[in-house]
Amino acid sequence: MNLRESWLLFALGSAFFAALTALFGKLGVTGINSNLATFIRTIVILLVTAGILSLRGEWSRVDSLPVRSWVFLVLSGIATGLSWLCYYRALQLGPVSKVAPIDKLSVAIAMLLGVLVLGEQVSWPLAIGGGLIVAGAVVIAVF
């Protein structure tokens, strides 16, 4: 397995940067409107992504993309925006040590949607892992 192409490497990177997102977001949202904070974050993401595309020469004509891709990417963008608005407001109101783990219920929900919508296979490790994520979130939220 080529480490640079491994989904696991990128998934671990995602987890690490998501943790930093929670920490930096909590520090950054203090004393300002959470919707404005989300807007600023979005602009930064746009600029960083455009820079990466430019450095790697990966720009392509957007009018050549399939309509199906457009529809689902727009829906994904809407879902991401709503998630971020909720997340930053939650960070503003609650401790990062509780908000971030509750936010990660998205992992269990994504697993369930993968099975229900995409027809992915249920396995014991998937079911047990998803159950443990939910159980952990409940423990953190309640206690």
Image (cartoon, grey):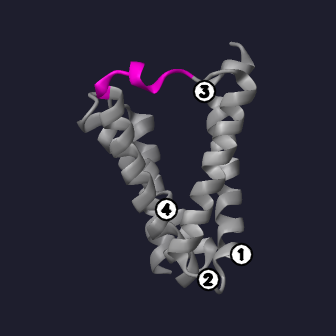
Q: Residue furthest bottom?
A: 31
Name the quadrant of the N terminus: top right
Residue for badge 2: 32
- Locate residue 114, reporting x and y percent: 33, 36
Q: Residue at x 45, y 36 (%)?
A: 125
The first of marks 4 and 3 along the sequence is 3
The first of marks 2 and 4 along the sequence is 2
What secondary structure is marked by label 1? helix
Q: Residues within 10 Å of mark 1 (few under 14, many from 20)?
A: few
Give, as a three-letter code, the residue at label 2.
Ile
What secondary structure is marked by label 3? helix
Are circles 3 and 1 on residues that touch, CB within 8 Å?
A: no
Residue for badge 4: 84
Are circles 4 and 1 on residues that touch, CB within 8 Å?
A: no
Tell me the quarter of the picture where residue 6 sits: top right
- Read off the magenta span: 60-68
Q: Residue at x 50, y 81 (%)?
A: 143
Q: Is residue 12 left or right of residue 137?
A: right
Q: Which of labels 3 and 1 is toward the front?
A: 1
Residue for badge 1: 27
